[in-house]
Image: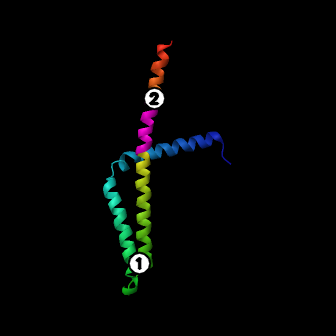
Amino acid sequence: MSNKLEDYSKSLELAAQINAIKPIIIEMNLEWLGHMIDRFQEQASFEASAAVLNPRYNPEKQSLLQVQAKTMSHLLNFIEGLKECDRLKLNVAAYEHQMDEVAILFT
């Protein structure tokens, strides 16, 4: 069983890891990533449709294409979530700054 200090430490470590990869993934071309998701899904669908006509049909290939599309979808959602978190963090900081400015007026 973990304790709160250990949980906090693990949370800080995870946050640091996410922040370390963020500059790389945040620059990904999301339009192209979305296009590739569609292409992998289309290819998986084609593989399934053409299975009866293909004597070398390998169901693992279709599964691979589906998992790749799903994984890329998760990546797209993750990147969009990171961008939304950054936007909201800026909004929170701006609001807190405004509240600090108002508080100064009354001191």
Of the residues shown, which amino acid type is indicated by label 2? Tyr
Q: Seen in the image, is 95 located left or right of residue 5?
A: left
Considering only vertical position in the picture, is 103 above or below 66? above
Region of the chain picked out in magenta, as a range: 83-95
- Give yes or no for residue 1 being in the magenta stretch: no
51, 9: nearer the viewer? 51
Is residue 35 rendered to the left or right of residue 97?
A: left
Q: Residue at x 38, y 77 (%)?
A: 47
Relative to 72, does residue 104 appear above or below in the rendering?
A: above
Vertical placement of residue 32 versus 62, above or below:
above
Near-viewer residue (15 or 65): 65
Residue 1 coordinates in the image, percent (x, y)? 68, 48
- Residue corresponding to mark 1: 48
Q: Residue furthest top?
A: 107
For the residue carrying disc 2, how many other residues have a C-alpha within 10 Å: few (<14), some (14-19), or many (20+)? few
Q: Label 1 sits on what residue type?
A: Ala
Q: Label 1, label 2: how many angstroms apart (C-alpha)?
A: 52 Å
